[in-house]
Amino acid sequence: MNLPLFLAGKIYKSNGDKYKVSRPAIQIAMTGVAIGLAVMIITVSVVLGFKHAIRDKVVGFGSHIQVENFMTLQNTDPYPICIDDSMMQALGRTDGVRHVQRFAYTQGILKTDSDFLGMTFKGVGPEYDLSFIKRNLTSGEVPQFSDKAGKYKLLLSQMTADKLKLKAGDKVYAYFIGGDNVRARRFTVSGIFQTNLTQFDQSICYTDLYTATKLNNWLAGQCSGAEISVKDFDKLDEVYNNIIKNVNRTTDKYGNVFTSKTINEAYPQIFSWLELLDINVLIILVLMVCVAGFTMISGLLIIILERTQMIGILKAMGAPDKTVRKTFLWFAAFIIGKGLLLGNILGIGLTVLQQQTGFIKLDAETYYVSTAPMEVSVPAVIAINAATILICLLVLIAPSHLVSHIHPAKSMRYE
């Protein structure tokens, strides 16, 4: 039989009036562990959810990897590259690649009777994955875009539609300036989306790939580039290295040189900002572990002082200091264990409740999302639980040495 474990269980279950002071101390220590753990779980869930929500929105506009003309890195002017069927197949066969799609940018001005806006028209073909736009569609429908003929359908953001006072089904003129010529095209607003990413919502609209390439006067097969989606974001660098090795510095049939970049390189300011959130998480985790540790230390000291007579009796009966220390460490483990159970229920429960109901609202203009995004990560929860119990027990080792200073003869007279 494990004597320290047996004694710790007896002490934990004891409800005698003799120990009226230690019972509140136990409850406070247990509550401190529970609240600390719940705050840590919620913090990690919020940060993970927020980072993934923003990352997915940025990826929705630009995919994970873009293959473009090398000259686009040297100049702000658009330079085309030929992405033919053979290049599409070569990119699609790369390990870790999930989907490949072409795109073409052109600049224009949307004008109504009362206002006008300069926009970036993103031309997309039939293979383009528009599931991100469909998830954020507020009105209208997502058309079937073409690379063979111009249907002059347009997808606008809610921000752009509000500024121009447009709604789904309305007609709007767009003007494109090329050299000394100004070309006008009449578009139909097919659908309106809202992602709350101001940087993109205020500047990008979608149309046919055929229309965009024709407006740029590009040759057959030319476009701004190809967007590549990877199967696992954690393996983005591995896939990117394969693209660099197999595609970069090769040329298309017109002699243009291929280059590529990741979404992190395309929008470094956004991803650097998201990485800064990790520092905030670390600070909160350290503070919460400190709170849990200090409450456990104070609780254990009170319990040891109240159990001085019991400690003296155990020593008088021949129990070594090591056994007595282990008894109180096991007792602390019981308290921490119950605190972890309550903390997990509270933390995970609130996270799941937010996921299902979205009761915590946010200002979309400030935070880019309308409700607080939360994501439960099982490995993160396990790691937080393991770290909490380990750190709490480690900080209790020193206070447990107090029992070595308690002498049996003196403890018998202790009140």
Image (cartoon, helix red, strand yellow):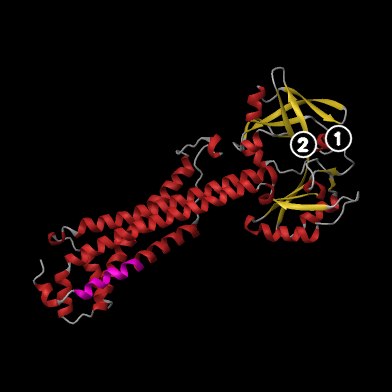
Numbered mark located on residue 108 in the image:
none
Which amino acid type is shown beneath numbered disc 2?
A: Phe
Residue 344 makes an appearance in the image: no
Numbered mark located on residue 145 in the image:
2
Location of mark 1 (residue): 214
Residue at 35% in and 52% down = 35
Q: Is residue 27 a member of the stretch shown in magenta?
A: no
Using the image as rendered, state which of residue 272 and residue 145 is in the foreground: 272
Left or right: 213 as drawn, with respect to 378:
right
Screen quadrant of the C terminus: bottom left
Residue 224 makes an appearance in the image: yes
Q: Residue furthest front?
A: 74
The secondary structure type at the circle numbered 1 is helix
Give the residues drawn in magenta, as a range: 394-405
In x, y percent, where is residue 132?
A: 65, 41
The correct choice, above or below, for 342 with respect to 200 in the image is below
Label 2 crowd bin: few (<14), some (14–19), many (20+), radius 10 Å? many
In x, y percent, where is residue 1?
A: 27, 78
Residue 114 is drawn in which quadrant?
top right
Q: Residue furthest top?
A: 113
Mark nearer the viewer, 2 or 1: 1
Of helix, strand and loop, which mostly describes the magenta segment? helix
The secondary structure type at the circle numbered 2 is loop
Which amino acid type is shown beneath numbered disc 1?
A: Lys
Q: Residue furthest bottom?
A: 318
From mark 2 to mark 1, how far is it between C-alphas?
Answer: 14 Å
Left or right: 357 as drawn, with respect to 156:
left
Label 1 crowd bin: few (<14), some (14–19), many (20+), radius 10 Å? some
In x, y percent, where is residue 12?
A: 23, 64
Residue at 77% in and 30% down = 108
The correct choice, above or below, for 252 with respect to 195 in the image is below
